[in-house]
Each structure stands twice: as structure tokens, then as C-alpha cells.
Amino acid sequence: LWKDQLRQPGVWTEGEKLTQLTKSKEISISPQIYVLLGQLLRRNDHDCEDWLRQGHSLFPDDFWLAYTLASELRRKGRLQESEGFYHAAWAIRPDSPGPLNGLGLVYKLMNDLDRAQQKFELFLKKNPRSFVALNNLGAVAAARGEQDTAIRYYRQALAQQEHSLPLTNLAAELMKKKQFDEAMPLLKQAIILNPKEARAHTNLGKIYSIQGDPEKAIASYRRDIDIDAKLIEAHHNL
């Protein structure tokens, strides 16, 4: 019952969810409790690594604990540790595409683009309709300066699912080609789908600035800062 209530919006506050999960852990220890606790803590900007490590030490063969811990370490920039836990998750479930994507993201952050591409291609082979895999292959191509290849992958990703990430990435590549009229509606659609897509606001502001509309540019940059006050580029643009 409590697991169903956790997933239903408005039933419990985030604090009540944390209380219920903590009580459940005391009554019955299970891998799922640690995963849900970790996800809840991270969603509320709390450090969840200790919870996940504790759970992993108790249940070293649980896929979701290894995978969630790997993702948390990647988020913190501890890439070698993250790589190890993604490999552990992959060993537990060799058919799961998630660890392949995670490893690709780790290698891209390491600037090891060949290994990143290899993992994303394996991910795509397991899930040929994955917009995530196609978007990430586009990001690898963009990092190599292969604009046309990146654009092709981003368009393929959007053909699978209209999502703010490939919309924003495709717009960024079009901006490099100075195709601002084509990039602008993509950025606007990205913001409709995800109003917190900071890069979409940034790049929309840049287009407005280039087109001589400083008021709209400033408004876009201010939305960036509202999303994340630590965004240095947004402050610089203002």
C-alpha cells in the first residue's frame, strides 16, 4: 500500500514519504527500500550515497542498488567509481541497456569518445527505438565536431520521441551553422515540454540578442537564473 501511495502525487509530502520509508526499513530490510530512499533523498537535494552504499553492502547482487549508486557517483563527478558500479550492475543483468548508457555517459565525461560511442551503439542495438541512445550518439558526434552527423542523430531521436533534450541539442547544432530561424522554434518547443531546460532558455536568449531584441534576451537569461542561480553563463550574458 505504501509503495502505491509513494507513487501517487499529493498523497504524502516528501517529508512524510521519507518518514514512511525509514519506518519500513526498520520493519523489513529490502533492496527496494534503500533504492527508494536514495531516489527520494536525491530528488530533495540530499546526499543519498551513504544510504545506497549501506544497501549495496547488504545486497551486493541487487541490480538497482548498484545502478542507482553508479548514477549518483556519476552525478558527483566520481567517474572511475561510477564506472565500477555500472560494470557491477551490467554483470548482474547483462541484457539491461541501462548500464550501457551509464557507461557511455561516464566515458563521454572522461572525453573517451570512442568508448562512449561503443557503449551507446550497444545500447541502441538492445533498444533500437531509444531516443536516449540516439541523442547520446548525437552528443558524441557533436563533441567530435561532426555537426552533420550530430544533427542526423538528433533528428532520429526526435522521430522516436519529442523530448526537450534532443530539441535543445539539435537547436544548438543549428545555431553553430547560423540557422537561427530553424533553431528558435525548436528551443521554444523544448521549453514548452520542460520549462526547466536551462540551455534552451540560454540559447533562446542568444538568438534574441543576435536578432536585436535585448528585452526578450534578458527575459530568457533571467529565467535561466531562476532555474539555477549558480549558472555562471546566464549571469555573464546578462
Image: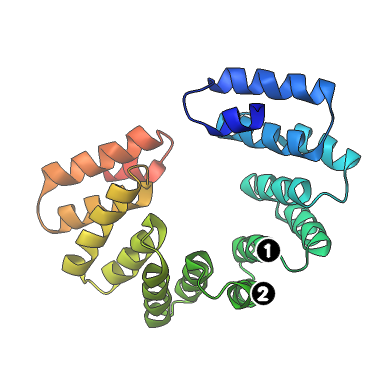
Tag 2–tag 1 contact (CB < 8 Å): yes
Judged left or right of residue 160, residue 94 is: right
Front residue of 211/68: it is 68
Q: Secondary structure at mark 1?
A: helix
Rendered location of residue 43, percent (x, y) = 56, 34
Residues at marks 2 and 1, CA–CA distance in whole angstroms: 9 Å
* Image position of 126 with respect to 171: above or below: below
Judged left or right of residue 56, residue 101 is: left
Rendered location of residue 71, percent (x, y) = 67, 49
Task: Please report the residue visible at 35 percent of the width from the left and 47 percent of the height from the top.
Answer: 194
Q: Locate the C terminus by quadrant.
A: top left
Q: Earlier in the sequence, mark 2 or mark 1?
A: 1
Task: Please report the residue visible at 46 percent of the width from the left and 72 percent of the height from the top.
Answer: 138
* Image position of 172 with respect to 213: above or below: below
Q: Which residue is mark 2?
A: 115
Q: Which residue is mark 1?
A: 103
Front residue of 16/181: it is 16
Instruction: Farthest residue to the left: give it.
Output: 212
Front residue of 37/153: it is 37
Rendered location of residue 69, percent (x, y) = 73, 45
Mark 2 is surrounded, within 10 Å at the Cα level, by few (under 14), some (14 to 19) or many (20 or more) other residues, namely some
Rendered location of residue 89, percent (x, y) = 78, 57
